[in-house]
Image (spheres, rainbow, N blue to C red):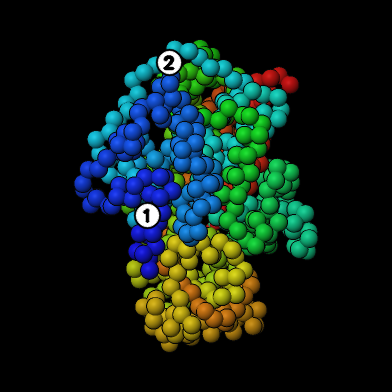
Amino acid sequence: MRSVRKCFLVFLLAVLIGLPVWSLEAAPPDQTGPSLADLHKAKGQNCKSCHGESMKVDDNESGVNAQCASCHGSLADLGAKSKHDINAHKSHLGQINCTACHHGHVASKPYCLNCHTFDMKIPGSTAKTGIERKIVRKDPTRDRADVVVIGAGAAGFTAAITAHDAGANVILLEKMPITGGNSMLSAGGMNAANTQFQAKKNIKDSTDLMFTDTMKGGKNINNPELVRILAEKSAESVEWLTSLGADLSDVGRFGGASVNRIHRPTGGSVIGAHLIGVLRKNAEDRKIDIRVNSKVVELLRDADGKVTGVQVEGKHRGLYVIEAKAVVIAAGGFSANAQMVEAFKPEFAGMTTSNQPGAQGEGMKLGEAAGGQLIDMKEIQIHPTVAAGSRILITEAVRGNGAILINREGKRFVNELTTRDAASAAILKQTGKSAFLVFDDSIRKSLKQIDGYFHLDLVKEGATVEELAKAMGVPADALKASVDAYNAAFDAKNDAEFKRPDLPRAIRTPKFYAIEVKPGIHYTMGGLKIDTLTRVINKDGAPVPHLYAAGEVTGGVHGANRLGGNSISETITFGRIAGATAAKQATGK
Ligand code: MEZ
């Protein structure tokens, strides 16, 4: 069934992009095929057909993309034409450039394949003979901005929008071909205390409780001043996002939280794509200058050490300078940089990651080279539930909504709502260093994003618990006994064996399901030291003038272990502070 679907998808992509289907007849992977430029030439196009009369391509590749859309239809048009479940043209990546996947002169590669393992061939994907661009050019013209923000994930977008709204002229830079960063992959939600949405559900929370949970989760090495801000401004941050058009009305429970505190879209849908869609739209509506394919290679400083701008490597423009009165680094963590992970945490060598490929730690290096201090670098979080053999995070919300963890012997082995480090350590002690998330149809229906795991063929199922055990390859009597014992604990409202603090649903409603999971590198708690105004702090404890940072690139908020839901919370709250402080610095207002 899966291969039929894949063949269909390949065929569909060919038809949608207007190419003869023969061009997709999969050349074996080791065989060189025509590039997209060759395919266009074969159809009577020339260079100017894609590049325009001027033959100039900007780093956003806007002209080329407009040209793709004018011939083939917009991403939305192409997406709407497809009725297929897995559809690259209407994926969670949102409104992205055609050229993020379809390259003219080098082998095309679906962006999805950075994280997924679909056998997805697209026109030109076997090309090997294209022109690899090596940037040697320098553009001597200089751009100017009040505030430059590095990294277009949730923290970067938030800082850019806030700085713009405070009256600053802003340039937002993103090295990847698409905006969104890791935030776009965020599954779970955003922690906040004392919100209108908690009040509507009669949830009694307080900023003190959020503070205490976060400190405890971080093993008390967090910076308490930053944690206080995280908790106290969290409800305001939810309101801010709501005012921009976000839906954070569903509230659930995650590990380490004393109450239901994680906010997400209605029905428990995935938060990241929704949030980035809202932030992107708000940035675009404000006409903020957003530049993708634009990597910052150096922070510029004057003789006093004040940051005065950035040197950018644009994919097409080459090296150029943007002079800025303030710079905000919001470039994320280093979970996808295997060498860095291994250097700071040798025991995590070779582990998969849930992160997008851009999470390379470059923002930390930039900040350090400009005088900033790096802290807590060895504090690296593994998330207990990455789907085995993939990079797909199975959100903690599945456990939060009632799933249990089962080992290959068919037994429960841990309180599923413990912190991530404890749950991961417990899984790594099991046979095969993996486990199964087991749930039933009531849990499936309680959380929309679970449907996504079915679409991705990650779920095994059975009409009875015994049938499920067969599909999982675990002893049926043991699995049945574990599920029965869990249901008895649910009825008694007391999990005496593992002390799970919240038992929201029994596992009784057929069908029954399981997803095999393994821990994967998920988050890097360390990074640039900041103060409560998000100023980057140097080794002597003084701020690096005119340099700010927010989000995963910083250290201190999460200490030794981040609680689920605190990352989006941090990006919004500290992104807002960074945007406001940088704008004030730049405009004097
Ligand atoms: O904050 C996170 O990392 C998170 C909510 C992840 C998840 O399990 O969904």
Quarter of the rendered image showing ligand 1: bottom right
**Disc 1: residue Cβ within 8 A of ligand 1's nearest atom:** no
Return the residue at label 1. Answer: 11
In which quadrant will I find the C terminus? top right
Query: Cα distance, mark 1 to mark 2?
Result: 42 Å
Q: Which mark is residue 141?
A: none
**19 left or right of 309?**
left
**Residue 515, quarter of picture:** bottom left
The x and y percentages for residue 117 are 37, 55
The x and y percentages for residue 278 are 63, 44
At 58% across and 27% down in the image, what residue appears? 289
Q: Please report whichever mark, 1 or 2, sits nearer to the chain's N-terminal start.
A: 1
Secondary structure beneath label 2:
strand
Return the residue at label 2. Answer: 139
Q: Amino acid at mark 1?
A: Phe
**344 left or right of 209?**
left
